[in-house]
Image: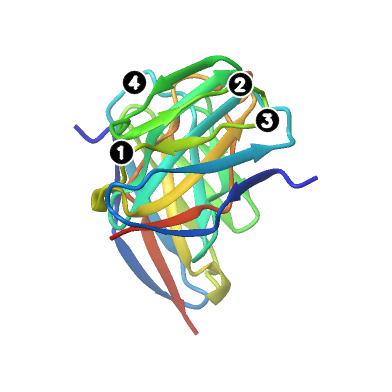
């Protein structure tokens, strides 16, 4: 059973548009939800993360929206730029200092 | 301050050969883990360690061994490589009291 489901698998957005990636989880014990950004040939890098006590967190052009009752969270990239073209992974964890459970990833292409 | 380093960057093995993937950190983080990344599968946890002398299995441990004799190093051993172990391997580290985890640059392994 996949604990974190991510969609879509791939996404093409025009420059300046909004990119939206969604994740859903099953385990109600999860209490930390990060998003990682990965460029080709590089390791994943922590982009932004949220705890379930807030419904939204914004850092620059990146926003996480969190819906605890629906067990869903999403990443919104405003004013998408070609430099945002990468693979994005959502993840979840139930305890500090333990494993992250990852979604399968979304490949984002921002066309200029 | 190198953060998380992984060696080698690339490796080609023949079926049945053994090898060790190295992960080292200078961040003094207690938690270390190994993930494998396969196309369309996201990142899957192989083994993890919460401190020197303590290791445990993740989601896909078969065919891999680990040990943790120091805080800094967490090697991953393939005892008898199989083509199914062709993948990109990432090491991640984190503080025991923190949810944040940081990834190394990865090792691309091909087993023929």
Q: Nearer the viewer, residue A9 or B102?
A: B102
From the image, state whether disc 2 or disc 3 is nearer to you. 2
Does mark 3 fall on the same chain as mark 4? no
Q: CA distance from mark 4 to mark 1?
A: 11 Å
Kindly identify the residue that appears in the image at 65 percent across and 55 percent down: A60
Check residue B69 in the rendering and tell me which mark sits there, or answer none.
2
Provide the residue designation for mark 3: B72
Residue A96 seen in render: no
In the rendered image, the vertical position of residue A23 relative to residue B51, given as above or below: below
Kindly identify the residue that appears in the image at 30 percent across and 35 percent down: B63
Chain for numbered disc 2 = B
Helix, strand or loop at label 1? It is strand
Provide the residue designation for mark 1: A24
Residue A71 percent across, percent down from the top left: 32, 31
Neighbour class for label 4 at 10 Å: few (<14), some, many (≥20)? few
Q: CA distance from mark 1 to mark 3?
A: 35 Å
Q: CA distance from mark 4 to mark 2?
A: 35 Å
Residue B87 percent across, percent down from the top left: 36, 53
Chain for numbered disc 1 = A
Provide the residue designation for mark 4: A28
Check residue B34 in the rendering and tell me which mark sits there, or answer none.
none
In the rendered image, the vertical position of residue A109 relative to residue A62, given as above or below: below
Chain for numbered disc 3 = B
In the rendered image, the vertical position of residue A41 relative to residue B78, given as above or below: below
């Amino acid at each position: 059973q996949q604990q974190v489901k991510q969609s879509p698998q791939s996404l093409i957005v025009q420059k300046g548009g909004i990119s939206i990636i969604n994740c859903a989880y099953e385990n109600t014990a999860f209490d930390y939800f990060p998003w990682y950004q990965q460029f080709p040939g590089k390791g994943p890098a922590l982009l932004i993360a949220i705890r379930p006590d807030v419904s939204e967190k914004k850092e620059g052009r990146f926003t996480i929206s969190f819906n605890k009752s629906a067990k869903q969270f999403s990443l919104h990239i405003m004013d998408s730029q070609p430099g945002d073209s990468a693979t994005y992974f959502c993840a979840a964890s139930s305890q500090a200092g333990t494993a992250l459970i990852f979604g399968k990833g979304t490949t984002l292409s921002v066309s200029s | 301050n190198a953060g998380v380093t992984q060696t080698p960057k690339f490796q080609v093995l023949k079926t049945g050969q053994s090898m060790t993937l190295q992960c080292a950190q200078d961040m003094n983080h207690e938690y270390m883990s190994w993930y494998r990344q396969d196309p369309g599968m996201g990142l899957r946890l192989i083994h993890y360690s919460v401190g020197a002398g303590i290791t445990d299995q993740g989601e896909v441990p078969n065919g891999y061994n680990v040990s943790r004799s120091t805080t800094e190093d967490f090697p991953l051993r393939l005892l008898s490589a199989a083509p199914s172990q062709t993948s990109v391997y990432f090491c991640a580290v984190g503080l025991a009291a923190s949810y944040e985890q940081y990834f190394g640059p990865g090792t691309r392994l091909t087993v023929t």
